[in-house]
Image (cartoon, rainbow, N blue to C red):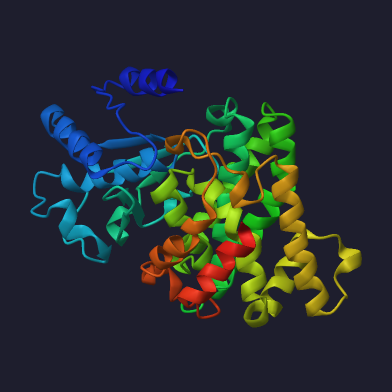
Amino acid sequence: MLAPVQVLLEEAGLSVSVFAGVVADPPEAIVYDAVAYAKQFNAQVVVGLGGGSSLDVAKLVALLAHPECAQTLVDMYGVEQVTSQPLPTIHVPTTAGTGSEVTPIAIITTGETTKMGVVSRQLIPDIAVLDANLTLGLPAHVTAATGIDAMVHAIEAYTSNIRKNPVSDMYACEALRLLVGNIEQVIANGHDREARQAMLLGSLMAGQAFANAPVAAVHALAYPLGGFYHIPHGLSNALVLPAVLRFNVSHAQPAYAELARVILPVEYHHDDDAVMAERFIQTLEKLIGACGLPSRLRDVPVQHLAGTKIPEQDLPMLAKSAMKQTRLLVNNPRDVSEADALAIYEASY
C-alpha cells in the first residue's frame, strides 16, 4: 500500500521519509518517536496513511513537529487545549472505520489500561483522499469490525444529547445507508471496488457526523475493553452496541425509528416508532452476526490472557473504568450510572 503513494510523491519532486512504527492503540512513546523522526527529517508536510491509529499519530506529529510548537502532548489532552498550529496534513485511510481523516480527534494510550483524547479543530487534516484500491486487501474480520465502528459513529452522532444538529443528522443518515448497504458485500467479496469505495465514503461521512455531534455510551463502554484486553476498537464497539441501544431506547426511540427508515425497506416505514426502533436494534444485532463478529464478551479470546476469555468477575471493574469517560457519557441520550454500565456489560456478556 505504501509503495504507490511514496512513488507518486517522489515523482512530484518531493523528499519522502517513512515512519512505520505505529502500532494499534498507539502509546505516547510511539508519538514521541514519530515526532523526533519528523523533526530530524525537517518535515514540512505530514501524510497519514493507514488505519485510525496511523492517522491519529499523524495528526499529533503535525502539531508537535511544527517548529513553533511550544506545547507537549500532555498539554494537549482534553477539549480545545491546543494552542499551536500544525504542519499541513494529508490523510489517506486504508480502513473504512474511524473517519479520522475528517475528525478533530486523536486517541492515545496513556498507560497500561487507559486512553486519552486530544480534541481540537487544529487536528482536522487539510486533505482527505479516499482510494478504494488501498482497502481491497483488508481481511474480512478487520473490514467487519471497522465497518461496525463507522456505523456506531453515525448512530451515536444521530442521537447525541448535546450537539445533535441537522447537518450532522444528514451525514449520519447517508453514512448509515452506505455502510449497512455495503458491509456484507465487502466481507463476501473483498475485491468489490465499488462497495469498498461506498464503505470509505460512509466512514468519512460518519466521521463528519460525530466530529460535530460527539459519540457517547457505546464508545465509553468500549474503551475499557480495549484498555484492559487490547480488543480492537471496532470489535469493542460491536460487543456492547446492542445492549447500549436497548438501554437507550426509552429515551431515543423516535431517533432509532428514523434511522430504521433509512436502512429498512419502504414497506416497513409506516409502522409506529416503537416497532421501528425494535426492528432497528434487531437489524444491527443480526448484521453483527452476519459479519462474522463475536456477539458476546464471553466469546472473545484475550491474547495477553493466553487466549482465555474475559472473566465475568471483571465486569464491575470495567463499569468503574467506563464511568471515567465523562467526555463521552455526557453525549448519551440517557444518563448512565455505574450500575447501568455494569448491567450493560452483563447483558453483553
Residue 237, by quadrant, is: bottom right
Residue sitting at x 64%, y 78%? 252
Residue 51, by quadrant, is: top left
Residue sitting at x 60%, y 67%? 244
Residue 146 lies, with reference to residue 266, above or below; the image says above
Residue 26 lies, with reference to residue 192, above or below; the image says below
Assign the C terminus to one quadrant of the image: bottom right
Residue 266 percent coordinates (x, y): 87, 64
Residue 306 percent coordinates (x, y): 47, 33
Residue sitting at x 62%, y 75%? 248
| Residue 101 visible from this viewpoint | no
Give the left or right position of residue 166, taking residue 187 as reference. left
Residue 90, by quadrant, is: top left
Residue sitting at x 60%, y 53%? 239
Q: Nearer the viewer, residue 254 or 120?
A: 254
Give the left or right position of residue 100, taking residue 265 as reference. left
| Residue 206 visible from this viewpoint | yes
